Amino acid sequence: MNVIIEQYSVETKDDEVWQLSLYIAGQTPKSVRALANLRAVCEKHLIGKYKIEIIDLMKTPQIGRTDQILAIPTLIRKRPAPCVKIIGDLSHTESVLVGLGIHPK
Amino acid sequence: MKTIDNSSLAGHALKKCPTGIQGFDEITFGGLPLGRTALVCGSAGCGKTLMAMQFLVNGAMLYDEPGVFMSFEESETELAENFASLGVDLNELVAQKKISIDYVYLDKSEIAETGEYDLDGLFVRLDYAISSTGAKRVVLDTIEALFSSLSNVTILRAELRRLFRWLKNRGVTAIVTGEQGNGMFTRHSIEEYVSDCVILLGHEVVDQISTRRLRITKYRGSAHGTNEYPFLIDEQGICIMPITSIGLNTSTSTKRISSGVERLDTMLGGQGFYVGSSILISGTAGTGKTSLAVSAVDAACRRGERCLYFAFEESRSQIVRNMKSIGIDLEQWISQGLLQFYASRPTLFGLEMHLVNMYKKVNEFKPQIVVLDPISNMEAVGNFADVKLLITRLLDFLKLKNITLLLLDLSNVNHTEKTGIGVFSLTDTWIGLRDIELNGERNRCLYILKSRGTAHSNQIREFVLTDQGIDLLDVYTGSGGVLTGSARYAQGEKEKAQRLLRQQEIERKRREIDRKRQLMEAAIIDLKVTFEAAKDELEKIITQEEVQLGTQDKNREQLATVRKADATE
């Protein structure tokens, strides 16, 4: 499982609220898992400063086009900048942390 | 033995989706398989995207079937520019909801893969695009781009399989493009999933000439042409020129047209060439082939017919200028739009491209006469067999349309009865032009080697280019062989002089007869006169003698009487 991601310094202000959008296509086992995993990570590392938005492409398909969503589930971190895209059900927690640029405390 | 009756199965036969691409629908007997997915693969730059685009555009504009173009490589603006090269305003079509463009972009560096996923996002997008336009045609170009963005090949393959099944269930006719891999049709072997129809596009360079070829390697459920078909890409997109066997089933005309040279018409059984026939004019350099062909063209334009002249050696202006010297004005026909020239060097492109080009020009201009001047330098571009094949296909195509074809061939001095490429067996009429050398002169001659369907003269005629056009004169055959040129003239003069002499001789003899008659008559009169004179003389003598005779008798009687008197007493 190779994860290639460029390292850039994430300058987070301590009080910036993380905006995370999870794109799913209907309630599937993968989506449910992804949501659960996401919540777990956020509760562990981002307490109090995150906001999860769930976008169901079955309901709003045109968003998939504008946001260029191919794989489901996809997690996009909109804030803080820059934008990061993570696909998969987020079961590999370490990759999730690396991808989001979260340094475990 | 029972034969299988296919008529009952006709309803289940594979339906086709016409692509509208020139020639393609013919070789597939209808188009792509309807409701199935076809794979178009080939190396870079061979026309896959173009073919897919044409499929959609034709669907929208000709068959009223909206389409979806899902692009994995080019953005919407780039696509709009590419479509513009086909003369299609993509934005307009999108606005009219006839085509929907979806640009799928995945940058590998932006994504992290963190577990299991599927490509439902793609499905949703595709589904949305199809539903919003009511599309019946879909293009995925090129789906292999996903392989470079996503690293989980297992998931990817599974999803692709699912995608193609999904497309089939949706009932859309789809084209998927793929780039050719080493020894396989596509780099990632997606041809395994797309099993209904595989089309291979190729681009070959031989002897510096490049040719594009298309081949249908697989077409399940239907007959199809299996050969490699050369094609052309031009401003209307892809154009294929398939060989057909229809050429041998055409109906033929019995109409005749003049060749432009009256004497030649009479040599051909009185009326000239058949409409829709093919005429080969062969001769060595400088024998007047172009002049003869142009005479025929001139005659045709005069009748209001259109002519298309393919010149492979001289430019249009050169031919026009040269023909002025024999009194033929081609400018007038050009300006009236009855004559069109197309001049190019044969080495400009490959043979197949020449053929497809000719095919297109004929379809556009719709001429009644086509001239190829000359066909011999086509050998610079292909070998003997290929050029003959090109001529065969062109002949078939033109016969189908009842267009008369004139082929000009430069034949070798050594081959007097063969042309360099054996085309003579294909054409209906064969006219030979030859130089005859005698007495330090070379004069041109024309003779007809064959003329299918008409009686033809077997005489050699001297072929003279005057400033009022072409003249065919009888040659004199003397003891030294065929006499042409000044020898013919000399002979002609000699015979004229002889004729004059003879006539004079006849006159003289006639006069002699008269004279003799007069003499005879004079002599007769003379004889008559003499005769009369002699007669008179003789008659006079006769009278005298008679008188004498009478006197003698009287004397005797008197004497007798006197003597008697003496005796009787």
Image: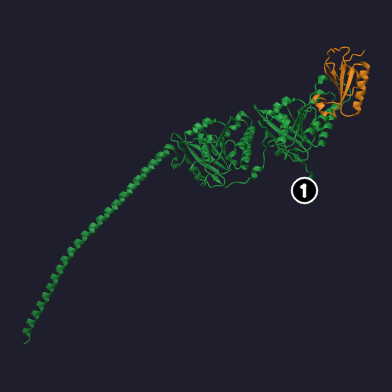
Chain colours: A orange, B green
The residue positioned farthest toward the bottom in the image shown: B569
Q: For this rendering, which residue is in front, B437 or B464? A: B464
Q: Which residue is rendered at x = 83% and y = 13% of the image?
A: A8
Q: In this view, does B87 lie to the left or right of B483?
A: right
Could you tell me which residue is drawn at 38 percent across and 43 percent down? B495
Residue at 61% from the left image edge and 35% from the top image edge: B361
Percent position of residue B385, x then y? 63, 35
Residue B69: percent from the left, percent from the top?
76, 30
Quadrant where the image shows the C terminus of chain B: bottom left
Is residue B511 among the parts visible in the rendering? yes
**Quadrant hosting residue B374:** top right
| Residue for badge 1 | B7
Name the foreground residue: B208 vs B495. Answer: B208
x, y (%) of residue B59? Answer: 73, 35
Answer above or below: position of B506 versus B40. below
Is residue B41 or residue A32 the one in the foreground?
A32
